[in-house]
Image (tube, rainbow, N blue to C red):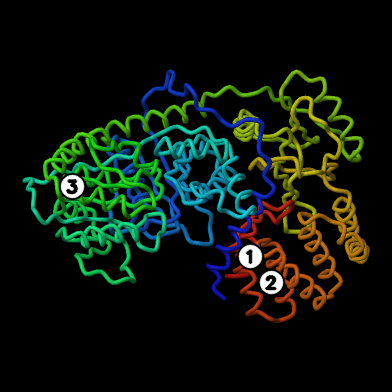
């Protein structure tokens, strides 16, 4: 079995599980007027990246990092991918093993985290204690949202409900995010590197122009087939020209012109300057870079009238526009430019002027200001009132609910945090809680409460509702379905009224050594438990079976449960223990490695604290 691939798949299942249970808050974090009073300061910024392959989106992110470094900021790029060799990066590149979360490798001194794909938001928002922003360049699912099946629509909607500031590269992208997800975005345009994209030394008007198009034929929205059909129509009209195609991967279809596969950035600039007309057939774009690059290098541009290119394209001024999905209209525009050299030169000169507007100095000044303002807001933001109260020990759920309801119905503060005698939080943890509460994401929040004495030498952490908003309706204090988890751990003491009855009874039986009682109790209750409770129940059942030396039954229970809950590392760890007792050392070692690389199962209701450390004892 490929452990790395398996664990990576399990990790993303955990993230998806979190999203399915995420409850959108009452309001999202606004950044309106966040520039007011913001001061320039040196920042430490981490960009999270899914991949670093050659493409326009990755190139823009790399340009961001280059210019932030040049402005005196410290920048990290954190990815599961290896450091690329096609771009001379100035930022520090951190390669994360595939089985680990990228957030775990973000340096402690980082001021702000920039997500570059929306599926990064859950891990960054949930697992980090830094402000997070989303820089979106326009994925296919955003523009083709209605084509997605219902399950994916729900998934994407929950991704975008996570309340972080959002920045998009164009008006059409920001408007589309607003329409589909209700996201209030801010525009930060893309720009060009003037050291690569600059005018040719001499400009000629050949009777046989070179016509260039850029893109992969296997990416339908790029419209490469439409461009090739348009050029076929032009050739059939008797016009002479040379075809030039730049693509990231070698095409499967035949091509008789000049083909450039995955050229370097410097080579791409030279290719633009060798050509006379550039053609784009895109069906949609958020901010179409190649036509702008072509303008900067002296090509007359023909494009479809997709909304993204209209961010800078003006028909008859700096380009000619055809219709989306209409090769004939593109052919007509190309013929106009082949036949009219004066028009071609007019578009080229205006294209130069257009390209100069998208200057990295201006764009990065805006980006730098926004990042600085968000960090400043994070550090100096207004916190809601937080009352800290203590509950008596050994309450029933009903008694606890009555006490909490009475307090939250009459208190002046906005939130109340509940502790038991002997429990305490550090000032830094309270500060972190206040940060999250300031965003008003939920009415109820759960903390990760650690219990060191429940299972000998195996401290466990449980999610418990410990924070309630003023005027909340408090009925079942153990119900986690309406709460949001705050990544703060609390050292718990003794019994807890915040646990569901079945788990509270199981803990009591285990402390008394009534293992047979646990087996009977859990087998009778299991079918009625929620999907969130079932893996925890299996763990306790396995613990009881181990204590009764029923190793075969225990292996059978754990093996079946791991198929249903593959990312719950507690189960693979316990199976390793059972296999070790049974003398199967090789399989036991495999289970310990699986549990260790899966990491602590912090997205489940209960989990072994620091599973990596526990497993390491058996892997020396």
Mark 2 vs 1: CB contact within 8 A = yes
Q: Does residue 364 lie above or below 564 as drawn?
A: above
Residue at label 1? 595
Q: Quadrant of the C terminus?
A: bottom right
From mark 1 to mark 3, how far is it between C-alphas? 64 Å
**Nearer to us: label 2 or label 3:** 3
Residue 31 in percent (x, y) is at 50, 27
Where residue 464 sits: x, y (%)? 76, 43
Q: Viewed as shown, does residue 361 lie left or right of 415?
A: left
Residues at circles 2 and 3 in contact by the CB criterion of under 8 Å: no
According to the picture, the residue beneath numbered tag 3 turns out to be 337
Q: Is residue 487 above or below residue 326?
A: above
For marks 1 and 3, the one nearer the N-term is 3
Residue 576 numbered mark, or none: 2
Q: Residue furthest front?
A: 237
Between 103 and 336, the one nearer to me in the picture: 336
Locate residue 75, reporting x and y percent.
37, 43
For image coordinates 27% across by 46% down, the residue present is 291
SS at circle 3: helix
- Residue located 43% across and 18% down the image: 37
Residue 405 picture location, percent across and down: 85, 29
Instruction: Report, in whole angstroms, how far the alpha carbon at label 2 lies from the one at label 3.
Output: 71 Å
State the residue in front, 170 or 10. 170
């Amino acid at each position: 079995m490929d452990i790395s691939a398996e664990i990576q798949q399990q990790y993303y299942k955990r993230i998806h599980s979190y999203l399915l249970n995420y409850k959108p808050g009452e309001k999202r974090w606004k950044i309106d007027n966040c520039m007011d009073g913001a001061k320039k300061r040196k920042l430490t910024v981490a960009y999270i990246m899914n991949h670093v392959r050659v493409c326009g989106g990755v190139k823009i992110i790399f340009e961001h990092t280059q210019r932030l470094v040049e402005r005196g900021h410290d920048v990290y790029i954190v990815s599961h991918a290896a450091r690329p060799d096609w771009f001379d990066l100035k930022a520090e590149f951190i390669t994360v093993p595939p089985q680990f979360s990228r957030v775990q490798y973000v340096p402690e001194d980082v001021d702000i985290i920039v997500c570059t794909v929306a599926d990064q938001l859950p891990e960054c928002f949930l697992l980090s204690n830094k402000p997070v922003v989303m820089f979106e360049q326009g994925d296919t699912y955003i523009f083709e949202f209605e084509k997605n099946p219902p399950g994916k629509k729900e998934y994407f909607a929950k991704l975008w409900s996570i309340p972080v500031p959002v920045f998009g590269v164009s008006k059409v992208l920001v408007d589309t995010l607003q329409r589909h997800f209700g996201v209030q975005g801010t525009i930060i345009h893309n720009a060009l590197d003037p050291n690569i994209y600059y005018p040719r030394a001499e400009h000629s008007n050949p009777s046989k122009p070179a016509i260039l198009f850029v893109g992969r034929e296997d990416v339908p929205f790029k419209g490469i087939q439409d461009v090739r059909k348009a050029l076929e129509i032009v050739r059939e009209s008797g016009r002479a020209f040379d075809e030039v195609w730049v693509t990231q991967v070698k095409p499967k279809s035949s091509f008789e012109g000049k083909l450039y596969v995955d050229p370097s950035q410097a080579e791409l600039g030279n290719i633009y300057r060798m050509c006379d007309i550039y053609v784009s057939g895109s069906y949609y774009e958020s901010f179409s870079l190649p036509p702008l690059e072509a303008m900067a290098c002296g090509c007359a541009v023909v494009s479809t009238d997709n909304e993204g290119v209209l961010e800078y394209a003006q028909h008859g001024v700096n380009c000619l526009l055809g219709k989306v999905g209409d090769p004939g209209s593109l052919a007509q525009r190309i013929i106009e430019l082949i036949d009219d050299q004066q028009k071609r030169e007019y578009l080229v000169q205006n294209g130069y002027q257009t390209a100069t507007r998208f200057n990295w100095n201006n764009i990065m000044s805006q980006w730098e200001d926004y990042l600085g303002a968000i960090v400043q807001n994070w550090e100096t933001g207004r916190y809601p009132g937080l009352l800290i109260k203590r509950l008596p020990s050994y309450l029933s759920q009903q008694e606890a609910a009555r006490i909490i309801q009475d307090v939250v119905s009459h208190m002046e503060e906005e939130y109340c945090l509940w502790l038991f005698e002997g429990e305490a939080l550090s000032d830094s943890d309270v500060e972190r809680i206040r940060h999250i509460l300031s965003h008003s994401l939920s009415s109820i929040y759960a903390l990760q409460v650690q219990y060191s004495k429940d299972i000998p030498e195996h401290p466990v952490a449980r999610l418990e509702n410990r924070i309630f908003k003023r005027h909340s309706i408090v009925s079942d204090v153990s119900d986690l379905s309406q709460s949001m988890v705050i990544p703060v751990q609390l050292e718990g003491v003794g019994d807890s009224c915040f646990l569901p009855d079945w788990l509270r009874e199981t803990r009591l039986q285990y402390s008394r050594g009534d293992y047979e009682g646990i087996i009977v109790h859990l087998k009778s209750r299991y079918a009625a438990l929620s999907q969130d409770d079932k893996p925890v129940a299996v763990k306790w059942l396995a613990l009881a079976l181990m204590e009764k030396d029923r190793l075969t039954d225990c292996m059978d229970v754990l093996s079946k449960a791991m198929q249903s809950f593959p990312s719950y590392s507690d189960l693979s760890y316990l199976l390793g223990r059972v296999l070790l007792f049974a003398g199967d050392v090789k399989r036991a070692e495999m289970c310990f490695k699986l549990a260790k690389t899966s990491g602590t199962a912090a997205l489940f209701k209960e989990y072994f604290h620091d599973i990596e450390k526990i497993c390491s004892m058996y892997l020396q």
